[in-house]
Image (spheres, grey):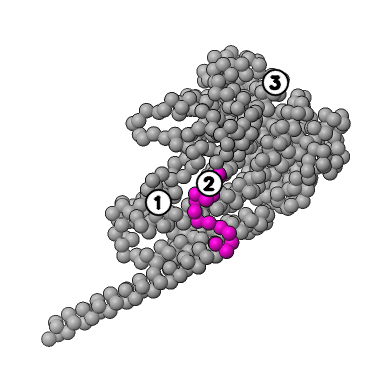
Amino acid sequence: MKRFFNLRTLLWTLASLITLYILLVTLENWTGARALAAAKEMLHREGETLDFQKLIHPPIPEATNFCAIEPLVGITQLQHADGEPESAKEKALKSIRLNPSGKSAPKTPATGSGFDLARPIDLNAWTKFLHETHYLSTAANATPAEILAALDQEKPLLRQLSDAAATRRDAAFTPPIGPGPNEALFAIRLPHLNFAQLLSRALALRAEYAIAAGNSAEAVRSMQAVLRLTVAMARDPLLISQLVSVTSHVINEQSIWSMLRQQRATEEQLATLQSDLQQLDFLAASLLAMRGELAAGYDMLRHLKSQPEDFGMMLGAFDSAPLKPWVSKVAFSIIPSGWMDHSAARLIQVEHDLFLKPAKAGTHAAHMAASEELETFIQQRSLLRVHDLLASLAVPALSQVMHRVYYTEAVHRQSIIAIALERYQLQHQKYPTALAELVPAFLKAVPLDPIDGQPMRYRIPTEGRYEIWSIAANSKDDGVKAPTDTKDIAKPSYAGDWVWRYSPEALK
């Protein structure tokens, strides 16, 4: 009798637990569906979309599209499976690579960020490097003109891109990025970013040698080619593309700085380069990238809801411990679908509040406040915050991205001002006492410091040519305190300003 009573109690307890589970699942599914619907409605009211395809840049005429020329068309799909041979196009693009592999390979000299220190790149080191690595069949003491001629002879792709950039004034990758059939957005490959970056480095080096050889026309064409690649990457609605475009542009800024330091470009060449630079807006590009990240994050959760066995692969993408597909499938079979809906709703809300709203505000203060909130959100990840778990995995690190974006946008605006100053000097044989004198003949308006929204600072020092500065990420005017190194220059901990200048030593 006692055994029967215990069995009945056990069955009653089990039935109660099952009933409770069903009720909880039903409640989670109902509330999850409502939360997701509300989040989507909020996005719709804000004019946002979760459709990644709607964020892809519309096609541009092939005749004006720099990326539609033969060496570049299709590089978004240049990938091969392990064991398969590389295509001829892939081999040609990789032959441009400047950083050789191997422990015994010489160290690659720097190509960018020397302008922060008012320091030209070391072309003597580069000439020796190109000789020692057999990148070019030139002597270790070859002249800049000889190096430029060898580049055009042995790496004709660089000359081809430079020539095309002069006539094709727009750029968007073709075909555009996007997932293939039955492929999730978080799993797409982006081979074009690697190719675009290695091409940017090589083109920037070609520009430096052209400048040193006194051939400003070729230098401008190579800089235009880097700008075209930068524009194309900035149009990709993903943060990784934004970061690579930022890196390429910083490299190109070194070439622009070098050409202005030499003062060998004509007013027409400078005006053309200034016009091309004005196509770029890294703050606007970051807003597009954040919209793409939201769409990709939502697509990831939607994909996971229908194919839970891919959860292990998703964890691998975030450098976490992967799970076997069957483990993921079993685990998700007992999780209510409403949990995924709640997670998607939280992802939408977090990325809208901490990514899109600050980007729309377009202020450094808004982004920094959002970065602090995001860090707190990620650090509070725990099993007790069940609806935040997947959302915290899906959101990217905002602060490190935006610090770099603001730095690059500030330097970008400074380079536009510097070109306008050199154009003014060519016409008036002096520099203006204030940037307002550049308007409207050389600038439509004085570019603003992206940190505080005030006109970029400018002065003519007792030594040197001129100084243009931003108050930098610490939001404090440090009186044109220039960096002693560039390691932490884009971080808020950097105590100094972002300065465009030419030291007396650099002008010799």
Spatial separation of the CA atoms under disc 1 and disc 3:
50 Å
Q: Are marks 1 and 2 in contact (CB under 8 Å)?
A: no
Within-10-Å neighbours for mark 1: few <14, some 14–19, many 20+: many
Instruction: Give how far across and how far down residue 299 sits, in percent.
Output: 44, 54
Residue sitting nearer the eye, 179 or 247: 179
Instruction: Give how far across and how far down residue 401 sits, in percent.
Output: 58, 48
Secondary-structure class at tag 3? loop
Which numbered disc, 1 or 2, marks the residue closer to the eye?
Answer: 2
- Residue drawn 85% across the image and 41% down it: 437
Identify residue for label 2: 56
Secondary-structure class at tag 2? loop
Q: On the rendered structure, is 125 left or right of 5?
A: right
Q: Are marks 2 and 3 in contact (CB under 8 Å)?
A: no
- Residue drawn 50% across the image and 41% down it: 176
Disc with the residue nearer the chain's start (1 vs 3) = 3
Q: Amino acid at mark 1?
A: Met
Identify residue for label 1: 314
Query: Can residue 382 be seen?
Result: no
User: Which image quarter: residue 276?
Assistant: top right
Identify residue for label 3: 215
Within-10-Å neighbours for mark 2: few <14, some 14–19, many 20+: some
Within-10-Å neighbours for mark 3: few <14, some 14–19, many 20+: some
Disc with the residue nearer the chain's start (2 vs 3) = 2
Any mark on residue 251, and which?
none
Q: On the rendered structure, is 82 left or right of 476?
A: left
Spatial separation of the CA atoms under disc 1 and disc 2:
23 Å
As drawn, 265 above or below 11: above
Query: What's drawn in magenta, residue-wise?
Result: 43-58
Q: Amino acid at mark 3?
A: Asn
